[in-house]
Image (cartoon, helix red, strand yellow):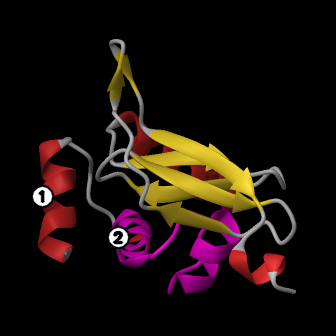
Amino acid sequence: MKDKIKKLFKDNNIKLTSAREMILDILSKANAPLNYEQIRSKMKIDMDKATFYRNISLFEEANIVQKFESDERKWYFEFLEKAHAHFICERCHSVMCVDFMINPDIEEHSVKNVILKGICKMCKHA
């Protein structure tokens, strides 16, 4: 995956720094979208919030990362590979990717993700 990340930097003419590489490495290995606090807890170097968001914005502009806001008003980020749906639990606020077929080109619109809301399996049975 590191070679793929380095290629993304080169292809998008983005300067490779250890902080940028670490952010993308964390996101590429994640099984679900992550928020700032979750990413920061996995980083091996200290990065202030402003620097983190500047880098994320750079990745968004290059269509490497996408973000969306949850019900708890937190931004979640993920490595952008294909259009897909997300499920947000209205009780525990967990966020997960969902295998839900979407047509990324609905009537000439370009769709990156779809947000589904409801009660997750864990909360439903609690």
Kindly identify which residue carries mark 2: 28
Task: Indicate whether residue 41 is drawn in magenta.
Answer: yes
In the image, residue 61 above or below residue 42: above
Q: Secondary structure at mark 2?
A: helix
Residue 51 in view: no
Quadrant occupied by the N terminus: bottom left
The answer to whether 73 appears left or right of 66 in the picture is right
Q: Amino acid at mark 1?
A: Lys
Q: Position of residue 107 (x, y in %)?
A: 36, 13
Q: Residue 4 or 88: which is nearer the viewer?
A: 88
Q: Earlier in the sequence, mark 1 or mark 2?
A: 1
What is the C-alpha distance between the residues marked 1 and 2? 14 Å
The answer to whether 93 appears left or right of 97 in the picture is right
Q: Secondary structure at mark 1?
A: helix
Residue at the spot 83% in from the left edge and 72% down from the top edge? 92
Q: Rate crowding at label 1 as few (under 14), some (14 to 19) or many (20 or more) other CA atoms within 10 Å.
A: few
Q: Which of the two marks, 1 or 2, is nearer to us in this view?
A: 2
Q: Residue 27 sits in which quadrant?
A: bottom left
Q: Position of residue 22 (x, y in %)?
A: 39, 73
Residue 73 in view: yes
Q: Amino acid at mark 2?
A: Ser
Q: Which mark is residue 7?
A: 1
Q: Position of residue 96 (x, y in %)?
A: 57, 67
In the image, residue 123 above or below residue 87: below
